[in-house]
Image: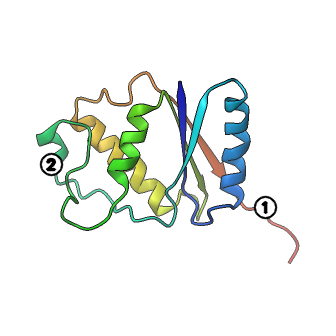
Amino acid sequence: MKVVAFNGSPRRKGNTFAAISIVLDEISGQGIETEIVQVGGMPIKPCRACGKCRQEKDGFCHGYENGGEDILNDCIKKMLEAQGVIIGSPVYFGSATPETKALIDRSGYSSRGAGNTMLKRKVCAPIAVVRRQGAA
């Protein structure tokens, strides 16, 4: 069994990483394999709704194949290999980071292109990290 967690923060070892690590420490203590994948600050483009995933029907995004480096399909592969998926992100102005949003949008859209079964029966959980307001 494996759980993969995606860190949507551009700060690789920041608060989001710390929160994900706490959760994964508990999970790995149960003998479950864990992995953290850095998404924040990495090249991951937004969904273009080109529909190529619906033509291929393999669960992967085909909209950026010739568009340079993009980590989305590597992330989808890790989701497929895992039984659990955690997506962590800091909250910026009421939303996840752009990379986190692109991960969710494109993996979800590609999953639907493959018949919406790619993530079926996987345990998934979000982690939202909000900066604490302190005295200036």
Tell me, for residue 109, which label it has, or none. none
* Residue at 37% from the left image edge and 43% from the top image edge: 76
* Residue 88 drawn at (x, y percent): 58, 49
Residue bearing the label numbered 1: 132
Going by the image, does 133 lie left or right of 16? right
How far apart are labels 2 and 1 at the CA level? 42 Å
Quick one: SS at disc 2? Answer: helix
Asked which quadrant contains residue 80, the reply is top left
* Residue at 85% from the left image edge and 68% from the top image edge: 134
Q: In this view, does 93 lie above or below 61?
A: below
Q: Earlier in the sequence, mark 2 or mark 1?
A: 2
For the view shown, which residue lies furthest in the left direction? 55
* Residue at 26% from the left image edge and 68% from the top image edge: 68
**Kind of residue at badge 1:** Arg
* Residue 131 drawn at (x, y percent): 73, 62
**Kind of residue at badge 2:** Lys
Q: How crowded is mark 2: few (under 14 residues within 10 Å), some or many (20 or more)?
A: some
* Residue 119 drawn at (x, y percent): 38, 30
Q: Is residue 115 above or below residue 134?
A: above
* Residue at 21% from the left image edge and 37% from the top image edge: 113
The nearer-to-camera label among 2 and 1 is: 2
Q: Number of labelled discs?
A: 2
Going by the image, does 135 lie left or right of 16? right
Q: In this view, does 85 lie above or below 1?
A: below
Going by the image, does 111 lie left or right of 35? left
Tell me, for residue 52, which label it has, or none. 2
